[in-house]
Image: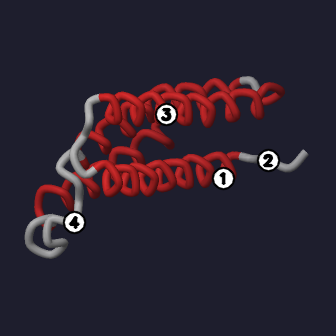
Amino acid sequence: MKKYLVPSVIISTILLLAYYLINDSLLNGMLHAQFHILVIIFFAQSVPVAWLMQMAQKETSQFPIYIIGAVGFRMITSLMVLTIFYLLKTPDLFPFMVQFSILYLVYLIFELIVVLANLRRN
């Protein structure tokens, strides 16, 4: 679980530091006002995903099922979060959705890199 959570903490910390320290000065306020909430949500998704990956390593015969479950969990919860923000009528919804999609891809690519590193040849 540490193999996944520690890098996830590092990614989340870098993103939060970018939001709080350089958003106004270097990025000219380009990040959405809710960006920090998105990072926290994606990190919160990482905890059950890390648990599923740990379970996948213990039961190697069920490895693909756990990984597909982790990706499915991330996708379903992300769609629910997008729906909630849409229903709350978040201002500047298009930039919000673009940043949400980029964060989704960043965490998904990270997740897949971790999975590929753990694959073994039979």
Contact? badges 1 and 3 (CB < 8 Å): no
Q: Position of residue 41 (x, y in %)?
A: 34, 35
Q: Earlier in the sequence, mark 2 or mark 3?
A: 3
Amino acid type assigned to the residue bearing label 3 in the image: Leu
The quarter of the rendered structure image containing the C terminus is top right
Q: Earlier in the sequence, mark 1 or mark 4?
A: 4
Q: Earlier in the sequence, mark 2 or mark 4?
A: 4
Name the mark on residue 117: 1
The crowd level at tag 3 (other Cα within 10 Å; few <14, some 14-19, many 20+) is few
- Please indicate, yes or no, whether residue 57 appears anywhere in the rendered image: no
Distance between the Cα atoms at labels 1 and 3? 27 Å
Name the mark on residue 30: 4
Distance between the Cα atoms at labels 2 and 3? 32 Å
Q: Secondary structure at mark 2?
A: loop
The crowd level at tag 2 (other Cα within 10 Å; few <14, some 14-19, many 20+) is few
In the displayed structure, does residue 25 sit left or right of residue 54? Answer: left
Q: Nearer the viewer, residue 75 or 1?
A: 75
Which mark is in front, 2 or 4?
4
Distance between the Cα atoms at labels 1 and 2? 8 Å
Q: Is residue 33 above or below residue 86?
A: below
